[in-house]
Structure formats: structure tokens, C-alpha cells
């Protein structure tokens, strides 16, 4: 999680004209989702499209942590290792992450780091979704 936070912080330093009013004030939202083996589930990253977002997955061990998708304002991109436990996509004009053909190993924590560039400054929200699996 720290690594992804640092990635977002380093990205912010490269964006000109972006003012974060209080960089220590970050909102964390904890969500739950349930998928079924072979089925699909969509994980939300807020109700409004963020200016920038990064999706990451954390499984049981440190080797299971991987970046999945991101959008730095030029359209969503999936990372090559994103398809390990499900077929993944980001719907057009959305920051949601859709997982299809779910495998049991897809169980874990999915985090979307979202940055919203507002007139009164940037806001950062972490959407942390625990995905459980049913047979």
C-alpha cells in the first residue's frame, strides 16, 4: 500500500497547477464485494470519475501484491499481470474495475487510489474493497 501511495505522491509532484490543500487528509472507504467462481463482479472507485486513479490487488502474501490498472488522464491501461485471477477491464468513461471468469485466487483486497482535482484543491480517496468468493 505504501508503494502505491508513493507512486501517487511522485505522480502528483509532476503535475503542474495541482494544489493539494492538506496532503495528510486522505479519505479511506472500506467496501465489501462477493463474487462467484466463474462469474463476474464490478468494483467501484467512487461515483464520479477521478482525474487520476490506480487499481492494485493484495492477496495472502507479499508476492501477491500487484498493480492492476491506472488512468493518468489519457485513458485506462491494464498492467500485464492484471489477468492472473480473472479477466479484467475498465468500462469506458469509468474508473470501476470489472472482473470476469473469477478464479478462487481472485479473493483479496482491491484498492483504488483516486485523485479528484477540484477548484478548491485536490482530494485523494482510497476505495478499499475486500472481495470474497462463493462457490
Image: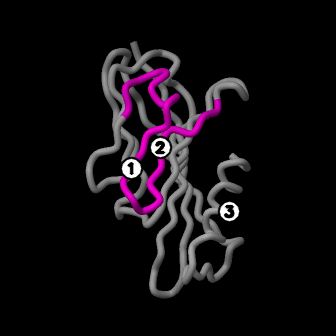
Badge 2 element = strand
Tell me the distance, in whole angstroms, between the alpha carbons under discs 1 and 2: 7 Å
- Callouts 1 and 2 close, C-beta under 8 Å: yes
Q: Earlier in the sequence, mark 1 or mark 2?
A: 2
The residue tagged 3 is 10
Badge 3 element = helix
Tell me the quarter of the picture where residue 50 sits: bottom left
Image position, residue 24 (x, y; %): 71, 71
Image position, residue 8 (x, y; %): 62, 59
Q: Earlier in the sequence, mark 2 or mark 3?
A: 3
**Viewer-closest of 27 and 59:** 59
The residue tagged 2 is 69
Numbered mark located on residue 64 in the image: none
Is residue 134 shown in magenta?
no
Mark 1 crowd level (few <14, some 14–19, many ≥20, 10 Å Cα):
many
Mark 3 crowd level (few <14, some 14–19, many ≥20, 10 Å Cα):
few
Please state if 19 lies on the left or on the right of 3 as rendered.
left
Q: Quadrant of the C terminus?
A: top left
The residue tagged 1 is 76
Amino acid at each position: 500500500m505504501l508503494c502505491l501511495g508513493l507512486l501517487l505522491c511522485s505522480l502528483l509532484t509532476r503535475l503542474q497547477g495541482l494544489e493539494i490543500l492538506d496532503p495528510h487528509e486522505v479519505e479511506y472507504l472500506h467496501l465489501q464485494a462477493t463474487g462467484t467462481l466463474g462469474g463476474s463482479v464490478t468494483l467501484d472507485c467512487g461515483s464520479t470519475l477521478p482525474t487520476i486513479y490506480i487499481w492494485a490487488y493484495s492477496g495472502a502474501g507479499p508476492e501477491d501484491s500487484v498493480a492492476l490498472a491506472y488512468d493518468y488522464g489519457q485513458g485506462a491501461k491494464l498492467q500485464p499481470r492484471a489477468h492472473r485471477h480473472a479477466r479484467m477491464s475498465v468500462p469506458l468513461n469509468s474508473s470501476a474495475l470489472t472482473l470476469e471468469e473469477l478464479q478462487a485466487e481472485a479473493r483479496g483486497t482491491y484498492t483504488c487510489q483516486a485523485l479528484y482535482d477540484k477548484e478548491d484543491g485536490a482530494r485523494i480517496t482510497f476505495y478499499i474493497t475486500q472481495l470474497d468468493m462463493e462457490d
